[in-house]
Amino acid sequence: MPETIGDKLKDFAGNTSIHGFGRIADSVFILRKVFWICALSASFGMCVFQVYRLSLQYISEGVNTKVSVSYKELEFPAVTICNLNPLKLSDVLLEPDLFQILNETEHAFGMSINYPYPKTSFPHTVPYDTGFSPMHTAKEVFRLRMGNYTKDEIVNMSIPMHEFILLCRFQGAACEATETTQIRDEDYGICYTFAPKIPIAKLAGPSMGLEFILNVHQQEYIPFITDSSGIRVAIHNRKYSPDIRGSGISIATSVETSIALTQRSFIRHPGRDGSQCDKDNKYSAILVCMEKCIGKGVANTCGCLSSWLHGADKVETMCSTPAEIHCMKQVQSAISSFSAEDCDCKVPCREVAYNKEVSTTAYPAVNQQGVLEVILNTDSASFGALRESIVYLKVYLASLTDELTEEELAYTEENFVSDIGGQLGLWVGMSVLSITEVVELIILLCIWCGSRKKDSKTDVENFDKKRSSIANS
């Protein structure tokens, strides 16, 4: 009797290593067959459900965080300092575009300021109506109008470097000119970045750090624009430009400020497709990337620039009219939609950051005044006024420890395969060899179907031959 497909399946059920099939094949009673069919179906269902949950866990790409602390020589970071006052008042009063802002703000408050410097003749115009307070509007418009000046023009309207930085020492030695770079910032005008020529720090402590005595020239501070006296300090990785507005620290005058640094390093897992963090480490922080993205959005939507840093094609002017400023604010308030549609901002995969511990004390001490007069080459009569503009700053590494935070996948490919094997073994008693048996069955069934088709064709041909012979006879 020829073998049927049922015989093939019964033979497979009786010999396979997958649990349950043999029970179904060997059962004589119907109830027993039904019981084992239900048990096998439930087991297969639970197995599929558990494998589905494992797949979700694998796809989620969860991470474990490992923290380690090491003691080693560290690279001293770059330090950028800015005067809180972006331009000299004496020069601003001679610039019609800038003085107009002060003039309109005076009228908005119903006051008149007696400036100690000559000023340009500028008639009163209609105040800006941007929907914000006069002080906020003055600061925003002033920042935007500064963007229309070249760097050389901003330098000429700023306090010269030798008048701003009265003393600079690194590890007890005077700073070299090549170690200080002049940069431009959209909020604070001209700033100075100090990056030591030999950055490796072999010792920690205040004596092995950076020391500044600065003169901010309070008499040149611009009313309505600069609210407080002092400097802005950004401490950052030497590879990146400073984020002075976002991560800077404001330091007051007439005090000694010490900033003790502790280095922290981060290694983030990029994910299996590399989308979880920026492997190129293009930006030091997400905020920097988002600001650039929003700046491009303002340029495309409003036809003007919200920052001279965010240059765009065919856009050459800063936003300055009330309509442009209102448009700029609308785009900035829609940051969520911008980030979803246009921004591709991620945290860097590798990052070096610094914990900052700030301490202050009154400066200078009474007995130190004479020494400071000699250092600054001034006399007692002018020292009283000078003290109101003096900033004494120390930046140093508190220790040579590096706290490394490293991410690693919590659920790897090895875990995934192992857990799937465990679920298959628990619920249906399957292994890789069991799967091989199923593949073998499929191949045998295909061969059987092919042979059956061939036999059927042969039977038809034989029948036709017999019918022809009968007809001829």
Image: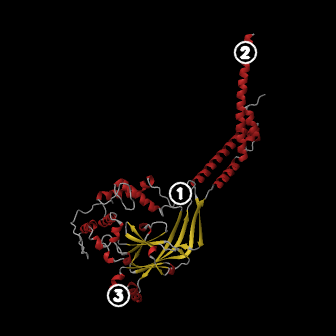
Q: What is the distance, in whole Å, between disc 2 and disc 3 at their CAs? A: 134 Å
Mark identifier at residue 379: 3
The percent coordinates of residue 398 (x first, y second) are 52, 77
The earlier-in-sequence mark between 2 and 1 is: 1
Mark identifier at residue 276: 1
User: Which of label 2 and label 3 is nearer to you?
Assistant: 3
User: Which of label 1 and label 3 is nearer to you?
Assistant: 3
* Residue at the (34%, 55%) spot, across then down: 302
Mark identifier at residue 29: none
Q: What is the distance, in whole Å, between disc 2 and disc 1 at their CAs? A: 76 Å
The earlier-in-sequence mark between 2 and 3 is: 3
Q: What is the distance, in whole Å, between disc 1 and disc 3 at their CAs? A: 60 Å
The image quarter containing residue 129 is bottom left
Q: Is residue 268 above or below residue 20?
A: below
Q: Is residue 8 above or below residue 431?
A: above
The percent coordinates of residue 345 (x first, y second) are 47, 58
The C terminus: image quadrant:
top right
Residue in the foreground of this view, choosing between 461 and 146: 146
Residue type, numbered disc 3: Asp
The image quarter containing residue 83 is bottom left
Secondary structure found at label 1:
loop
Image position of 38 (left or right of 238): right
Secondary structure found at label 3:
loop
Residue type, numbered disc 1: Gln
Residue type, numbered disc 2: Arg
Secondary structure found at label 2:
helix
The percent coordinates of residue 295 (x first, y second) are 39, 58
- Residue 429 in sight here: no
Q: Residues within 10 Å of mark 3 (few under 14, many from 20)?
A: some
Residue in the foreground of this view, choosing between 439 and 426: 439
Mark identifier at residue 467: 2
The percent coordinates of residue 298 (x first, y second) are 37, 56
